[in-house]
Image (spheres, rainbow, N blue to C red):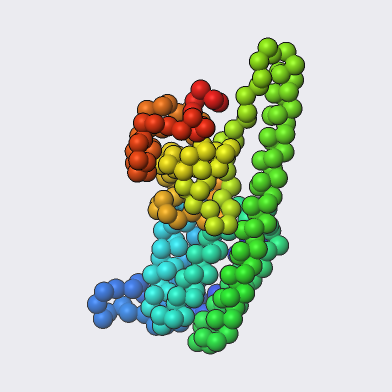
Amino acid sequence: MKRISFFVLSALLVFGCARTPAPDITDGSEGVISRQDSLKLGVENMQKGLEAQDLGDRETARQAFFQATRHFSQVDKQARDIMHKALSDMKKIIDVSAFEYAPRDSFNVLLLYLKMQNAYMDGDLQVLSVLGKQLEEIVLKAQETTVQAKQKKIEDLSHDITKSREEIKTRASTDVLEVYPTIHVVKKNETLPSIAARHEIYNDSFMWPLIYKANRDQIKDPKAVYVGQDLKIPRDISMDEIIAARREAGAPDPEKVPKEAYTPRRK
């Protein structure tokens, strides 16, 4: 569906803007481009970013989104802020694979964004604000649908693992230990400490740095995780790493790991 949206974006550029490339933005007076050209270049870079994201080229996508934001910054701030948030929300649903798990809502987000571009071009702030709120609602819906679908997938996999463990249990002389997940899908209002505190994760909120370090590729700020992210949960860890994580998180006595907390011996 993203490929269809690229065609729509291209059509918008053909009929809404001239094909002649606009000059680069410079710090001086020479080469300063018009508001319409800034918007055109912003749309073009946004399209490049989506295409790169679709191909798995995150660095190119990041650069393209940066350039899109740079061009959008040439127009009035209030409208720019609305568009910037919409672009950020679109990137989120791409990052959590919402097009795979919630394709209809994700495609509607793209269509709404195109309508916002038209309102942005026309300078209609009122329409832009209304569309922005609608987009935000659909993005939240797409994230929730994605979380549910991913959770079901994980539960199905866990069921298969549990079934295999039960077969082992019939031959073992001791109870089979609990199966701990290695992936956690972020849900609404969750934080790294609240995830680490979950019974099936670490059962200790002070162990959140372990999750942060294992997901540095997608978590830039440990205080900011968003709905639908797939976080790796490290299991091959040592007691030294657990103590170091608890110390980093500010545990009162990091070396006294609670007996109910996850440790390698309980895997």
Considering the image in quadrants, where does the C terminus appear?
top right
Relative height, residue 12 to residue 177 (above, below): below
Residue 93 is left or right of residue 22, and the answer is: right
Camera-side residue: 107 or 196?
Answer: 196
Outermost left residue: 28
Residue in the image at 61% along x and 64% along y:
140
Residue in the image at 53% along x and 53% along y:
190
Residue in the image at 49% along x and 64% along y:
88
Q: Position of residue 67 (x, y in %)?
A: 40, 65
Relative height, residue 41 to residue 229 (above, below): below
Relative height, residue 2 to residue 10 (above, below): above
Camera-side residue: 234 or 65?
Answer: 234
Q: Is residue 44 visible?
A: no
Camera-side residue: 92 or 116?
Answer: 92
Residue 161 occupies quadrant: top right
Relative height, residue 170 to residue 12 (above, below): above
In the rendered picture of this protein, how many numbered marks are placed on residues? 0
Q: Position of residue 244 (x, y in %)?
A: 35, 34
Residue 263 is left or right of residue 256, and the answer is: right
Residue 90 occupies quadrant: bottom right
Considering the image in quadrants, where does the N terminus appear?
bottom right
Q: Position of residue 181 (x, y in %)?
A: 59, 36
Q: Is residue 130 visible?
A: yes
Residue in the image at 58% along x and 57% along y:
188
